[in-house]
Every structure is written in C-alpha cells, then in structure tokens.
Image (cartoon, rainbow, N blue to C red):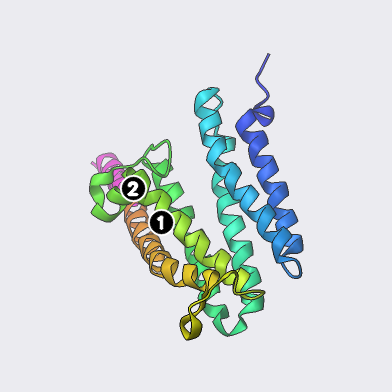
C-alpha cells in the first residue's frame, strides 16, 4: 500500500503553519498582538518540520516545496501589510518581495537542473559568499532571523514603540532599537539574494550552453 505523503508529520506541521499564518494576516490590520502571536507561532513551527522529516524519515518533495513556499509567502504577505502602513516606502517593500521570490525561484530551479537535492546543496565552490551563507548554520539562522525581525518590528512600530528604556532625553523604545540593529543584516541578506540570483542565472545559462553545444554537435554529425 502506497504511503500517504499528505499525512507525513512534517507536512502536517506545514499545514498548521499555513493556518496560523493566515490567521495572522486576518488580524494584521487591527490587532497587532494576535497577529504577532500567530505569525511567530507559524515561524516557530518552521524549526520542527525539517527535524521531523529527518527523524521520522519522512522527507518528501512535497514537504520541501511547502517549506519553501510558506517561508516566501509569509514574508511577502507581511511586506504587503507594510506597504499599507508605510506607503512612502512601498517601492522598497515591493522590491524586497520581488527579489525574494525571484532569487529563490530561479535558484531552486537551477539547483534541480544540476541535480542538487536542495537549494542549499549545490557546488558551493562557485561563490564564496553563498558558500559561507549556506554552510555556516549560525550565519544562516542569524541572517534569516534578523531579516524577519526587521520586518516584524516595522509592523509593530506602526502600533507601538514597545517597552521604553527610561533614559531621560535618551529614552528609546525596544522595537525601534531592534529595527536599527537588524536593518544592516536585512540589507545584507537582500544583497546575498542578488548574488544568489546571479549565480543561479549563470548556472542555468551554463546548462543552456551545454545543451546547445550538444545539439550543435549532433546536427554537425548528421550533416557529415
């Protein structure tokens, strides 16, 4: 009897991630507490689906795609809300959304064309920046967390400055401080996305060149 891939534990975790994410999107315009709670809960579960897949030997292409798409869509929908709350920076958020989707999409397909099991497993000797980014778990986790915190804190700042550190005229809100701390890492992660996009495009172009060379060789042999 064939296994029911849809009922794999990692995939069920991802279904809950989708539900919690959309509950968060519902509350985003008017209830930042509930929106933040469900958004963080959805993100928190992201730490468990991969572990469950490895532990239970339930890795699947469906789960891999779900994990990737939920990450992209969650950030994209948060940025869409930020476009509404900060219309003067709409172009910036649109650029971030487009770059995130574009770079991961083309990188995923270039990895598959070259036979990689994951977009994190490819010929890392191709680019030093991506090699350090994908092989150092501390860097990878830190950059992703800082990027997510940057946008989450921007969302919260629309409603509140958060707990205030009382320093007289130098008093500051914790949420604003986190934005300033995370901003450089968020911008750096977007730069890495540009590098990822360029490397992926070159990988695909390389596959194209190899296929065209083989085709030209076949046509040449037939004409002889």
Q: Looking at the picture, tell me which residue is in the foreground, 176 or 103.
A: 176
Asked if the residue at tag 2 contacts the one at tag 1, i.e. Cβ–Cβ closer than 8 Å, the answer is no
Is 216 a magenta residue? yes
Q: Residue at x 68, y 24 (%)?
A: 4
Residue 126, numbered circle: none
Is the residue marked by circle 2 packed among few (<14), some (14-19), or many (20+) residues within 10 Å?
some
Q: Looking at the picture, tell me which residue is in the foreground, 112 or 160.
A: 160
Q: Quadrant of residue 17?
A: top right
* Visible residue check, residue 59: no
The residue that label 1 is drawn on is 143
Q: In the figure, 15 relative to 73: above or below? A: above
Taking 10 as reference, is 185 left or right?
Answer: left
| Cα gap from disc 1 to disc 2, whole angstroms | 30 Å
- Please name which of the two marks, 1 or 2, marks the residue nearer to the observer: 1
Q: Residue at x 23, y 41 (%)?
A: 224
Q: Looking at the picture, tell me which residue is in the foreground, 99 or 152.
A: 152
Q: In the figure, 186 relative to 205: above or below? A: below
Q: Residue at x 37, y 44 (%)?
A: 137
Indicate which disc, 1 or 2, sits on the residue closer to the N terminus: 1
The residue that label 2 is drawn on is 207
Q: Position of residue 211 (x, y in %)?
A: 33, 46
Which structural element holds mark 1?
helix
Q: Position of residue 152 (x, y in %)?
A: 57, 64
Q: Which residues are magenta?
A: 206-224
């Amino acid at each position: 009897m064939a296994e029911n891939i849809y009922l794999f534990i990692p995939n069920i975790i991802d279904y809950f991630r989708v539900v919690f994410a959309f509950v968060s999107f519902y509350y985003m315009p008017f209830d930042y507490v509930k929106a933040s709670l469900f958004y963080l809960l959805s993100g928190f579960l992201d730490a468990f689906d991969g572990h469950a897949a490895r532990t239970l030997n339930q890795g699947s292409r469906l789960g891999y795609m779900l994990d990737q798409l939920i990450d992209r869509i969650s950030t994209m929908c948060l940025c869409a809300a930020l476009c509404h709350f900060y219309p003067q920076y709409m172009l910036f958020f649109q650029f971030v959304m487009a770059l995130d989707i574009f770079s991961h999409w083309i990188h995923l397909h270039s990895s598959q064309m070259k036979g990689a099991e994951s977009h994190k497993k490819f010929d890392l000797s191709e680019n030093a920046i991506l090699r350090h980014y994908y092989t150092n778990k501390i860097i990878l986790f830190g950059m992703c967390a800082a990027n997510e915190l940057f946008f989450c804190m921007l969302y919260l700042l629309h409603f509140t400055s958060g707990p205030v550190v009382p320093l007289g005229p130098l008093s500051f809100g914790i949420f604003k401080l986190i934005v300033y701390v995370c901003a450089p890492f968020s911008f750096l992660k977007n730069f890495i996305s540009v590098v990822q996009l360029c490397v992926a495009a070159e990988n695909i172009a390389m596959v194209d060149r190899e296929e065209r060379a083989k085709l030209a060789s076949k046509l040449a042999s037939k004409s002889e």
